[in-house]
Amino acid sequence: MDFFKKTLDPVIALSAIAVLDIFLFLLVGAWTVGGGETMMTGLAAQFFMGDAVERIPFWRFVFVPDAGYWKIYISLGMLFGAIVGAVASKEFYWRVPRRLSEWVMITIGGLLMGVGIRLAFVCNVSTFFGLTPEMNLGGYLAISGIIAGAWVGSMIYKKILEG
Amino acid sequence: MSVVAECIVAFIFGSVVGLLVQRSRFCNTAALRDAILFNSFRNTKALLVAMMILTIGFTLFISLGAGNPMRFDVGLNQVIGLFMFGIGMVLAGACTVSTWVKSGEGNVGAMWALLFTFVGMFLFSLVWSANFWPPAAASMTGELNLEALQLGFANAQTLQEKFGIPAVFFGIIQAAVLYAIFRAIRRKEQAQEAAQQENAATGATGATGVAAEPAQVAAQ
């Protein structure tokens, strides 16, 4: 099947995703990832800490751990769809970062993404595929932040690339 | 819609997205990083096209009183939060979508980034629990709240209510702005392509050093 042999044009892929996102917006809400990830964090905290998690106000007032939160299943679906695509196109193989500097960058990057999402209440997906198309003021604020951040990140990345 | 139905709809949507992103190698990080560092716009153009479709689609349905727009107060925290996120995604080499998709391809680095995104979220939950900023949904007013560095709430729906003009009208203006950015990128690409062809022609007549430069950029 050609679909699993050739790389798909991202314009076509993203156009299809956009049309589906409009239906999702009509049914439950626009595509988002950060909210589902936060709920997964809460569920993981509840799993490891038990009832003690309720002593942290954030998990009592902002995100009460709930496995029935629909946004979790978008992320799990993306993982599933990617596994299907990678296996069917014979592109699944274990890739492990080799250099210590890569591990350090990924660790810092992951932490910044997690803190940033929660501080902003939005992730990059809800910025570009939810808030801004809804013409929400938060979308414009978030886009300003992410472009400035990506620029600073790119300069750091360039310095590291240049050694 | 029942909770189970919502979760099933979300899972189906996510699965199709995961498949399409995996097959197209789309990455939001690359859409910004490659445009900034390498003048490469493959992902940026896809992002803009999706935003144009979504802007028209969302605002059209908002005009008709349908859809589920996000509703919460916004303010300085969106700028600072996404600024941190922007640095983080470039360092990690993946955004929220590509961490999941690359994890599905067997990328251990993406799994590690995902794990530390969760750790970052948990750490933030502790910080929030100490200072209660930004305000939780229950204490949002929808109005300007300078004390909490919040600007309130505004979207296409509030524009429609304020001006009495259908939201899709504003949506068309936004889509036109996005299209203008798309056109500017295409013009830049056409200029790059013309320069490459010229370099290749020069290279064919003997000046091989000049033609090597675009290949290096592509390799990055």
Image (cartoon, coloured by chain):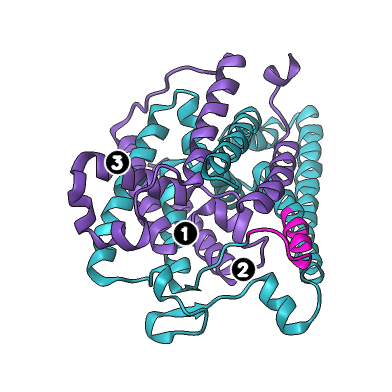
Give the crowd class for mark 1: few <14, some 14-19, many >=20 residues within 10 Å. many
* Callout 3 touching callout 1 (CB < 8 Å): no
Give the crowd class for mark 3: few <14, some 14-19, many >=20 residues within 10 Å. some
The CA span between labels 1 and 2 is: 20 Å
Residue at point 71% right, 29% down?
Answer: A8
Q: Earlier in the sequence, mark 2 or mark 3?
A: 3
The subunit letter for the residue under badge 2 reads A
Q: Which residues are magenta?
A: B54-68
In the rendered image, which residue does mark 3 sit on?
A: A44
The amino acid type of the residue labelled 1 equals Gly
The subunit letter for the residue under badge 1 reads A
In the rendered image, which residue does mark 1 sit on?
A: A149
* Callout 2 touching callout 3 (CB < 8 Å): no
Q: Main secondary structure of the magenta part?
A: helix
In the rendered image, which residue does mark 2 sit on?
A: A136
Between circles 2 and 3, the one closer to the viewer is 3
Secondary structure state at the residue bearing disc 3: helix
* Chain with colour purple in the figure: A
Q: Is residue A127 above or below residue B155?
A: above
Residue B148 visible in rendering: yes
User: Could you say which quadrant of the image residue B214 lies in?
Assistant: top right
Residue at point 73% right, 13% down?
Answer: A1
The one of B8 and B101 positioned closer to us in this rendering: B8
